[in-house]
Image (cartoon, rainbow, N blue to C red):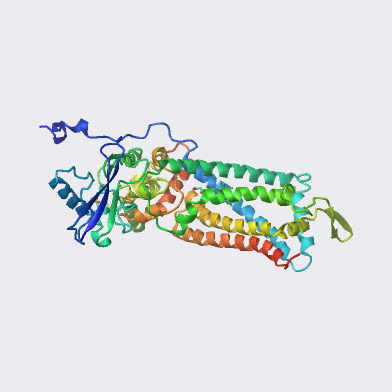
Amino acid sequence: MRLILEVWRQESPDAEGSFETHEVLDATPEMSLLELLDRLNHQLVDNDQEPVAFESDCREGICGTCGLDVNGVPHGPEDNVPACGQHVRSFADGQTVRFTPFRAKSFPVIRDLIVDRTGLDRIIQAGGTIAVDAGTAPDADTLLVTHDDAERALDFAACIGCGACVSACPNGAAYLFTGAKLAHLALIPHGKQERAKRARSMIAQMQHEFGPCSQIGECALACPAEIPLVAIAAVNRERLRAGFKWRKAN
Amino acid sequence: MSSGIQERSDVDQIPVAKRPATSPPPRPQTWLLKVIMAATGSVFIMFLLFHLAGNLKVYLPDDPQGHFNEYAHWLRGLLNPLLPGSTFLWIFRGTLVACLILHVYSGLTLWIRAHRLRGRHPRKVHATKHHLIGRTMLWSGLIILTFIVFHLLDLTIGRVVESKQFSTAPTYTLTHGATTTEVTDAYANLIHSFERWPVAAFYVLVMVVIAFHLSHGIWSIANDFGATAHRVRSLILLLADIVALVVVIGNASIPLAVLAGVIA
Ligand code: HEM
Ligand code: SF4
Ligand code: FES
């Protein structure tokens, strides 16, 4: 397959940046989008050119590293699939495929297709962890969690922190990401201890760098972990709940 | 034993993107502005439904004029004698104006924040209903704001855009058994205004815009008030479209009925 790749090249955070066009003649339908970029990079290195900088790690949809926009869509044309799991077969022979870094003011470009997503880390640092002494493993059946709650908590815990929801959002909001963590920890016994405190601090941090939610729903269509859209409502639910608790941590 | 990281001499040279400034979080906080949008939006919806119920009196089979004028008159004297004169009406108007100021202020602030934080590359979007309507809330809102001004000038104050026959003089006589009261002929003002077709068309158009604003707005309210239960969310999604339809059909039919000569 022949594909024309338009790739965003940006030397450094302060550089202007522009598109570079390359042709890949030996793409195959079963290649992943990252393998397509690998192929391009081999070609570039063979011609003594600088390879395109992009991120990846697990290449099996669990690490959340491979964030980039393909033809203006986070991760690529398929909904709810990470870039490493999307394939060249989505494109027609001879088609132009445009690679851009994740789009959001809160994700400044470091180089080419690599953006700085530490804004999401700062939200987690603000309280997306459990800081109570959990002691040693309790006896079976002393901490009861219903099966439904456990399942729902796991669904929300599935977020891989890729940042596609922010890039998909026309407002650059991180509600799906933050809401997933808040909803996840609100459902399990250890998480409930600091529930109100967590909501206040994580949401304050989120607002600090990311935009407001307008309930548009692009995030849930992009999310490779299929975090359900209800996570955006969990943000305000947790914050309103915390508001009624005044100073209490839980 | 040395770790891998310490051995790397180029660590300092790895480019670091510019971080957003660590200023305090924006005030008023984003989540709070959204709650204000939802609360004031809810007040408007209750008002719209209340207003609609009054407007629909024009369709009453016998003496719509009398019923409509009586309703307008009743509104002015509501909660008498507990509150004197039109005190209630003024509290009611004050609340609505306060809500409007809060709603517009929050909407603009959120819009500005959202636009500052989106990135540079264009985005290909899913053409979902909530995308198309949700992203034009500010524009539909501004059309509604223009309409509110027009509507007050046209039928309440009677300046600039009112019909030639507009009058607030107590020319209509309400009869209750032996007692009669002279009141404003609000019904006649309404009919005269809608007999001008461009005005009627404007009203109809704005009702459609309001319906769009509402169908996304009610869905937003559910999220902003933190409704996470699946059944509640599905119900509200449905309710959003029903309320929007009721408002558009109920209100927009009136100018159309006047133009068609069904009510006169
Ligand atoms: C009849 C009058 C109006 C009604 C019934 C109404 C209703 C609503 C409702 C229910 C929402 C959802 C609120 C939320 O939970 O986020 C909303 C959002 C919005 N309204 Fe209004 N509104 C009215 C007038 C206006 C006006 C005059 C403006 C002028 C700027 C406006 C601008 C907006 C904007 C920008 C949003 C979206 C906020 C966001 O993106 O989160 N609205 N409206
Ligand atoms: S919520 Fe989904 S899209 Fe957002 S960071 Fe987590 S996995 Fe990625
Ligand atoms: S490389 Fe790990 S999710 Fe794609």
Looking at the image, residue A166 sits to the left or right of residue B145; the answer is left
Looking at the image, residue A123 sits to the left or right of residue B36; the answer is left
Residue situated in front as seen by the camera: A133 or A125: A125
Residue situated in front as seen by the camera: A76 or B81: A76
Q: Residue at x 24, y 59 (%)?
A: A88
Residue A205: where, in percent of width, then height?
A: 39, 38
Looking at the image, residue B162 sits to the left or right of residue A4; the answer is right
- State whether residue A67 is above or below residue B56: above
Tell me the quarter of the picture where residue A117 sits: top left
For the C terminus of chain B, give its image quadrant: bottom right
Number of marks drawn: 0
Residue situated in front as seen by the camera: B211 or B47: B211
For the N terminus of chain B, give its image quadrant: top left
| Observer able to see residue A144 | no
- State whether residue B107 is above or below residue B182: above
Residue B137: where, in percent of width, then height?
A: 52, 50
Residue B243: where, in percent of width, then height?
A: 57, 60
Residue B134: where, in percent of width, then height?
A: 48, 53
| Observer able to see residue B23 | yes
Tell me the quarter of the picture where residue B66 sits: bottom right
Tell me the quarter of the picture where residue A210 sits: top left
Q: Residue at x 44, y 51 (%)?
A: A233
Q: Among all residues in the image, which is located at the extreme right?
A: B178
Looking at the image, residue A33 sits to the left or right of residue A190; the answer is left
Residue situated in front as seen by the camera: B132 or B71: B132
